[in-house]
Image: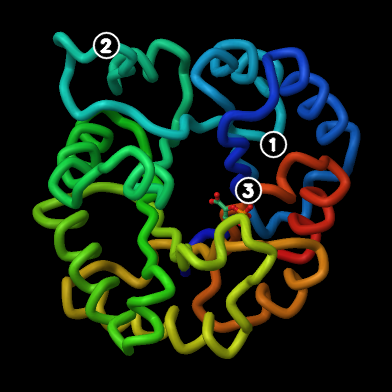
Amino acid sequence: MASKYCVANWKMNFNGQQGKEFVSLLNSKDLNNGQSQIILCPSFTSLFSMVEASSNSAISVGAQNMHFEDSGPYTGEVSAQMLNETDVKFVILGHSERRHVFGETDDMIHAKMVQSIKSGLTPILCIGENLDERESGNTNQVLRSQLEAGLADVNGEYIIAYEPVWAIGTGKSATSEMVAETHASIRNILAELNVSENVSLLYGGSVSPQNTAELAAVENVDGFLIGGASLDVEKFYSIYSDL
Ligand code: PEP
């Protein structure tokens, strides 16, 4: 059976102190629903302090990105080895903001997948179609090509997050019917690519306490990747409790 995850993508929000306060508030709650693992993904500068604050707790920490090379002339970038120094266990790769705002290609994301697994990190590979692609009936084709490219010759543990671009940060989540249909298609594509059904498939895109009870009940939804609502500890805990 696939494991469940409740993942916070804080994006470029929260400094180290705010991150530690969040961890302390979250840790004061009952985190033993036994259903899902919590992963908080803060900015690079907070990774050391967040790992320290969450040690000996049910909370894990992940990064939001990394470079695919070991080292070199890549100003502003952070390697997998550098992430290992912080002791994080997870890294988000191929988020739509990385793809669309920072121009990351499928080839770059694939190289990051290979490098993260080689370095002992568990990547969370994000895939998703934009509005034009959905409206023109190309969703499955887009997801298939992102999966084929991202997972080519990748062996090891990873998590996949389906995040329709049009649902990210818009307050317009995919409906549970759409998520059911799309997650079923993704599972079919994964089966064709010989990917184990134990690989977890998360949904992300305007997840909030208003829609998680319904979305969590959808078949093939193994958890959530949460942006906006993950900045509020009460909302995040409510979502976690729905899993
Ligand atoms: C995200 O950025 O991964 C995300 C899902 O954002 P939001 O929850 O704000 O839509």
Query: In this figure, which residue is indicated by the disc labeled 1?
Result: 58
In three-dimensional space, the C-alpha distance between marks 3 and 1, rounded to whole angstroms, equals 20 Å
Amino acid type of the residue tagged 1 in the rendering: Ala
Quadrant of the image containing the C terminus: bottom right
User: At numbered mark 3, what does the secondary structure look like: helix, strand or loop?
Assistant: loop
The verdict on label 3 being within 8 Å of ligand 1 is yes
The residue carrying pointer 2 sits among few (fewer than 14), some (14 to 19) or many (20 or more) residues within 10 Å by Cα, namely few
Q: SS at mark 2? A: loop
Residue that label 2 marks: 75
Q: Nearer the viewer, mark 2 or mark 3?
A: 2
Q: Upstream in the sequence, badge 2 or badge 3?
A: 2
User: On the image, numbered disc 3 is attached to which residue?
Assistant: 227
Of circles 1 and 2, the one toward us is: 2
Observer-nearest of 195 and 128: 128
Q: Position of residue 203 (x, y in %)?
A: 53, 65
| Residue 141 x/y as whole percent | 23, 79
Asked whether mark 1 and ligand 1 are closer than 8 Å, the reply comes as: no
- Disc 2 under 8 Å from ligand 1? The reply is no
Which disc is residue 148 wearing? Answer: none
- Side of 240 relative to 140 (left or right): right
Residue 140 x, y percent position in the rendering: 29, 81
x, y percentage for residue 216? 67, 73
Q: Residue at x 66, y 20 (%)?
A: 55
Is residue 45 positioned above or below 10 on the image? above
